[in-house]
Amino acid sequence: MSPSPAPGPWRRLLDRWQGVLLTLVVGVATLWLAATGQLVLYIHPRYDVFTVVMILIGIALSLATLAFSPVRGDDAHDGHDHDAGHDHDHEGRLAAAEVPAAGVGLRPRRRRPVATGARRLAFSAGVAVTAAIAIAVVALPPATLTSATAGQRDVNSSTAALDRTTVADATGASSDAYRSFSVLDWAGLLRQTTDLAFYEGKTADVVGFVTPSDTDPDDVFYVSRFVITCCAVDAQPVGVPVYLPGWQDQVAADDWVEVTGGFDTNRSSSSQDPVALVPDDVTTVGQPGDPYLY
């Protein structure tokens, strides 16, 4: 059985350096996101500087590894043919007298088929992952979380996010202040009180994406936003219920809308929200530059 052929020079180099190359790909992609202002789609803005600094350190270390790591013998001899007419001694070569005679029992080293196959599989998988990440970063633009994610994580299920604006804080606010309240502010107030006297005369003006109600998708939708504590992984959806029968004729799920109006008893027979926003106007708008709340 003849020994398996040695891997080519490019394969050996990729096999050795694919981890470093993957680090460089991810690092450059992160810097690109930061430079274009899109890093906030993944992490809280307060971590932007820290992330960029860590990425720069990682890139510097990766480049240093490529530049200063010693070259292995098999890499140094890539493409170097040893023909019969090319006779030279390598340093440390055994003297002829020290070489065992043929037939003494030594056999040429053979690559084990199983080990060779596993190594090829690992190499191919590494190259595929590196290429997939590079292509995804370049070809796929970053996107915000959608109503599907909001439905999976349950709108207004995070109590911590909804306690930032209290009824006591909002009681003495001016009408202009109420108009500046975000989806998070109103969602928190609606969770704290259902007293219609508190909402009388207060006009909301909120911007968010449309998330259909789980309990009454025909008549109620939420003006929703995601609240981020650290990164998009821990993002929690919050929303203001809007009572608007037949709302699908005006907007669709995931549309970004601006809704103005006052609050009243939710007339939906199946919705779990006792108070809802009754809109005076629903306008489709573009996605904000920073779609998340903090």
Image (cartoon, helix red, strand yellow):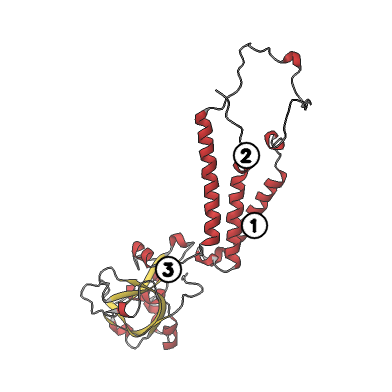
* Residue 252 image point, x, y percent: 35, 74
Q: Which residue is drawn at 60% across and 18% down?
A: 107
Amino acid type, callout 1:
Leu
The percent coordinates of residue 132 (x first, y second) are 52, 53
Any mark on residue 258, and which? Answer: none
Question: N-terminal of the two: label 1 or label 3?
Answer: 1
Say which of 58 and 165 sits in front.
58
What residue is shown with label 2?
12
The residue under label 3 is: 226
Distance between mark 1 and mark 3 Cα atoms: 29 Å
Disc 1: CA contacts within 10 A as few (<14), some (14-19) or many (>=20): some
In space, the residues marked 1 and 2 are separated at their CA atoms by 27 Å
Q: Which amino acid does label 2 sit on?
A: Arg
Q: Name the residue under label 1.
A: 56
First-in-chain label (3 vs 2): 2
Q: How crowded is mark 2: few (under 14 residues within 10 Å), some or many (20 or more)?
A: some
Circle 3: residue type: Phe
